[in-house]
Amino acid sequence: MLTAASVAALLLPLLPATADAGGREPDSLQEAFARAADRYQVPESVLLGVSYLQSRWDGHRGAPSVSGGYGPMHLTDARTALAEDPHHSHGAEDARGDTARETRRVADALPDPADLPGRLRTLERAAELTGLDEEELRRDPAANVAGGAALLAATQRELGLPPSDDPAQWYGAVARYPGSGNARAAGVFADEVFDVIRKGQRRTTDSGQRVVLEGDPDLAPRTAQLDGPGLRPASPARDGRVECPKSVSCEWIPAPYEEYANPDGSPNYGNHDKADRPASQKIDYIVVHDTEATWDTTLSLVQNPKYVSWHYSLRASDGHIAQHVPTRDVGWHAGNWYVNAKSVGLEHEGFLTAPDAWYTEAMYRTSARLVRYLAHRYDIPLDRQHIIGHDNVPGVTSAHIPGMHTDPGPYWDWQHYFTLLGAPFHPTAGPGSELVTIRPDYDEHKPLYTRCDASGQPCPPHGSGAVRLHTGPSADAPLVKDAGLRPGGADSTTGVNDTGARASTGQRYAVAERRGEWTAIWYLGQKAWFHNPAGAPTAVPSRGLVVTPKEGAGPVPVYGRAYPEASAYPEGVPAQAISPLPYTVEAGQAYALGLRTKGEYYYAKTFDPANHVVVRGEEEYYQIQLGHRVAFVKAADVAVRPARR
């Protein structure tokens, strides 16, 4: 095998600067790809395909991804990313007030670069291969593309393969690009890259650059190149405990189901509950989280019996999946026991208050494959009433609302995610429909957010799938208030974690009024206005059912869980209180209907699952889109009708 030094020597005659011999900068990012491909004898489609899977060709203004990757080619420099970005070194604990997550890393205890895995140090190697300065590789997209091309060319040579203008001959080099080290994960990444190359892509990047990859539908990569140096062989058979589609890389890293003693000596256990779903209870939800931690910290936390649990974690660099809890069992992830008992939780490596610590395309894609698999297996509709964020889970009581989590936050691209799911949000009704689905243009829609860190400065401008809600049809009108989030009546804010005046892509709301370029929706018992101009709409008309108070009924109470009536509980199982939240549905208001369900409660208070009981009642509930979070009303209190079109 060639060493890095010998490969660098071979490539020295080809080393680029980011300008040509006459000192002229590339005219565009597209030209930068073409120049790098030509100089390093890498097919341009391969270079574009790898970059798309890593960054969707975005440069993120030189900011690192959650796994320490920089630029369109995601050249990794984890130590620099951890040292320069407080979100990587401290999670987002301070901004979120999320003290339950102990994800702190101390800056002066950062690892020596030599101790970091190779997948976290590809920028250093790109600098050796190209002769370019590391800072230039981090900040200059053209230099970054050249660095990625050099890495691919070097890997091709290490595999003993000659440069080739046939993209099919680059499967092995592409597979090794993210540095996963595992043949299964590497092959899945390469398959995704070549799928992009076959289908083609075109996109305007975050810097306004138009980049096009023309499709090559007949391309058949040499997949046998996966065998060879640099990768751990895939297991002959996948661990039978994992529940993942065959098209993803998935391993079993179990969360512990263990007993332990509290400090006072009393017995306790963690970190999930045994169950028998869906035989015992239907799974209604898939809950999308971000980890607020790096990959290694995430795995450490979920393997702690005294911590909480979730079903799956997804790695940013290549989309690799680790399953921790069987889907039949109940993870402790949503902060709402009713939702926990009815859901599967997915944690994505990321930080919601660090918009430039971006989610990679590789992770979006494998997450979408996993969700499609789970949705098909458990008959879960692909909509935002069933595929929800942690920030859409309601508090179980009024006291719990202020402490509910806010991930994955306004920077998660729900429209792109649902496009990958095969269920993009389209208009389904005429322009005067009573229902609308929130759908701003993620890349163009950049509302101001604050408090991404402790500096007091606005967050960096960034695409967002959320719209801000005002008390009147004007950007100068105050933001609507959330009586649960701020019981004292204080105003909502532009804070990145403040969900009190926010509606997100895919959520459906009933229209209360329209005035010019502004639309009002019913939201937390009030009219909430958002800018929705015809030339750049932030919502599309939809069809569906709405819930209204029954004629003559008083204000309808709203709940954070759908628990059975007291008479449904058997002896030995304490009846759970059904506590109204500080919101009501008033006469004349309407809310989009989500799912219908009868009250259920999973009693699981002991380590021995033989003592667990599912309590089912006769009281029927409707889930509604009340605010940013969903909520429940009793069917006896409301009427259901089609939205007016």
Image (cartoon, rainbow, N blue to C red):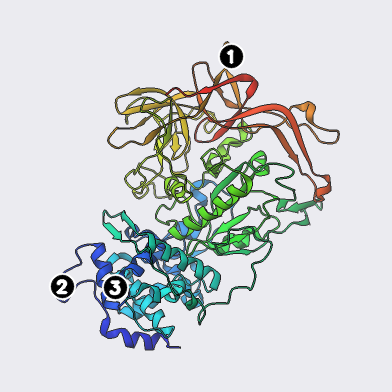
Q: Residue at x 52, y 44 (%)?
A: 406
Mark 1 residue element: loop
- Mark-to-mark CA distance, 1 and 2: 75 Å
| Quarter-of-image position of residue 471 | top left
Q: Is residue 499 above or below residue 24?
A: above
Q: Residue at x 49, y 35 (%)?
A: 628
Q: Is residue 316 left or right of residue 64?
A: right
Residue 542, image x, y percentages:
43, 31
Residue 163, image x, y percentages:
34, 81
Question: Mark 2 is on which residue type?
Answer: Gly
Mark 3 residue element: helix
Asked whether residue 218 appears in the rendered view, the answer is yes
Q: Residues within 10 Å of mark 2 (few under 14, many from 20)?
A: few
Q: Is residue 141 above or below residue 378?
A: below
Nearer the N terminus, badge 1 or badge 2?
2
Q: Which residue is mark 3?
A: 37
| Of marks 1 and 3, the one in the foreground | 3
Q: Which residue is mark 2?
A: 23
Asked if labels 3 and 2 touch by Cβ distance under 8 angstroms, the answer is no
- Mark-to-mark CA distance, 1 and 3: 69 Å
Residue furthest left in the image: 22
Q: Which residue is mark 1?
A: 554
User: Count of labels shown?
Assistant: 3
Nearer the N terminus, badge 2 or badge 3?
2
| Quarter-of-image position of residue 636 | top right
Q: Residues within 10 Å of mark 1 (few under 14, many from 20)?
A: few
Mark 2 residue element: loop
Q: Which mark is residue 499?
A: none
Residue 227, image x, y percentages:
52, 79
Asked whether residue 140 appears in the rendered view, the answer is no
| Of marks 2 and 3, the one in the foreground | 3
Residue 501, image x, y percentages:
44, 33
